[in-house]
Image (cartoon, coloured by chain):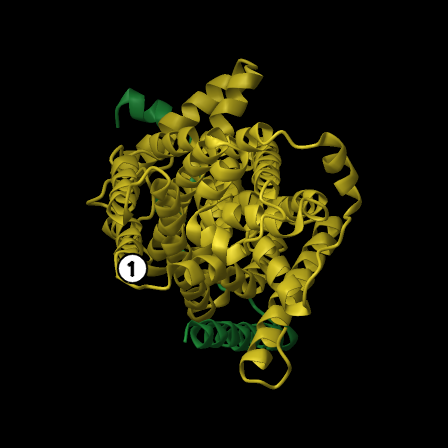
Chain colours: A yellow, B green
Amino acid sequence: MTVSPLLGQPLLSEEDHARSRDRSRVHHARFHGKRGRLLWLLVGPGILAMLGENDGPSMIAYASDGAEYGIGFFVPLIPCLFLMSFVVQEMCMRIGAVTHRGYGELVLQRYGRLWGWFGAGDLCLTNLITLIAEFVAIRVGLAYFHLGAGVAVALGLVLVLFTLSGGRYWRWERTVLGIALFNGLFLLAAILVKPDLGTIASSLSFQPFPHGSLNTLLLLLASTIGATVTPWMIFFQQSASADKGMTPKDVRHGRYDTGLGAVLAATFGIGALIAGAALLHQGSGIQGFAGAGFPAALSHVAGGAVGTVFALGLIEAGAVAILTISASTAYAAGECVGVSHSFNASPRGAAVFYGANVGVALIAAAVILIPGAPLLSIALNANVLATVLLPVSLVFVLMLANDRTLMGRWANRRSTNAFGIVVIVFVSICGAAYGIDSFLQTVHLIDGP
Amino acid sequence: MSEEDDELFMHLERDQLVAETARPVPPARLGPRALIGLWGLRVFAILVSAMVLYTFLARLH
């Protein structure tokens, strides 16, 4: 650490040095009016949060929706849910850029240790379950190429270690962004199944409404919401925005980044839905498709190229989510313990951060190697549990974004608050309705489907 | 501090330096209604999570 003669206090750590180099490029691009370069330098956290959430379970859920119900209703629903996600993630980006602090540390410091640790506990539980589901998705993708669970575990862990090896946020972000762009494989799969454009256009009227029991519809809704907004995204984007060194001057570009991520994620999600719809009326249920392997089923019905592209897409979706979800766990751990939590810090200087990043991936990897573990059930329930726990995180995001002591003139407008409250109520009702209905069926207080 | 350090230092806002972000922000003062609302939210999350986990485990068997 060095002493600044400008402010007369010890300030510059290795983390500051790394961040200031990134910021100097932003200043240079802004000063010289290089708009394209400025956008290139400032995109990252938003796209990664959105494409990270287009993860293995989410893409399997979209494809299952298509296979079970067709594309009607879901084609317009997915953009609506990503609009909801944009509103939430924009708040997280803004809070991170203005306060330069992560979600976990702000909740802990502003609202007390109980609330902070509760949020971190929520996150660790849902992240661990989701990470297991990501390894399952990679395994399903690799199974198409006749490769087993051991390869899935090795691939996931090698990627985590490789991306952490650079010691810089910028390097980590660009590496993961490069992998995340292959989420576009789901769009390619949709094109390869040669969908009827008239059917896609007519589905924009939310018709036909999915059939089935109330519980099935609630599960569908809860898992689709869980595929677009989750607690890890909230932790990740706020912390990553702060780690990237974003400031209030960058909020406009942060919105572009988040909006671009939402558009890409919705497009690729619809791609998975349309590809899955090729299996409509093929006589196998959601469990059957996911268990036997969507890629193999698609290959049988729509051709080998579709199966191969979908399998590669699943591997990518699982891999990117492992990287971003492990990172969100690491940010939360470092913030709640109150120690260094940055990709710009060295492993020795941020042992908790790096340890949590690798540790949570290791635990999830170990679970999928357990013989007979109920991996499919875990994968299908991961999004539902995330939806149930989401309202807690959303309420605190809204409170932080309205906290004028922290946010000053960057605090929420009324319109943002109104939309935020609608999102919280909608998510709470969907999660609670599914949880209560399923529970009452399980204990035989009401009749099942 | 070298000249290069000085230049790099200028590219960071003062409140984003590690030394500054390491200082905790003051706790918020919440009114009784906000506290009751937060507790209600916690109870809601715990109850519904327990129901989902119970259902998940019961269906495994």
| Relative height, residue A210 to residue A17 (above, below) | below
| Relative height, residue B21 to residue A179 (above, below) | below
| Relative height, residue A382 to residue B15 (above, below) | below
- Which is nearer the eye, A103 or A387? A387
| Residue A13 visible | no
Q: Residues within 10 Å of mark 1 (few under 14, many from 20)?
A: some
The residue that disc 1 covers is A367
Q: Tag 1's secondary structure?
A: helix
Q: Amino acid at mark 1?
A: Val
Q: Residue at x 43, y 21 (%)?
A: A25
Residue B19 pos. (x, y %): 34, 45
* Most distant residue in the left direction: A348
- Which is nearer the eye, B25 or B43? B43
Chain assignment, label 1? A
- Which is nearer the eye, A375 or A339? A375
Residue A373 pos. (x, y %): 32, 63
Q: Residue at x 43, y 47 (%)?
A: A293
Q: Residue at x 49, y 38 (%)?
A: A300
Residue A378 pos. (x, y %): 42, 61
Residue A204 lies in quadrant: top right
| Quarter of the image with the N terminus of chain A in it | top left
Q: Residue at x 65, y 32 (%)?
A: A195
| Residue A220 visible | yes
- Which is nearer the eye, A201 or A250? A201
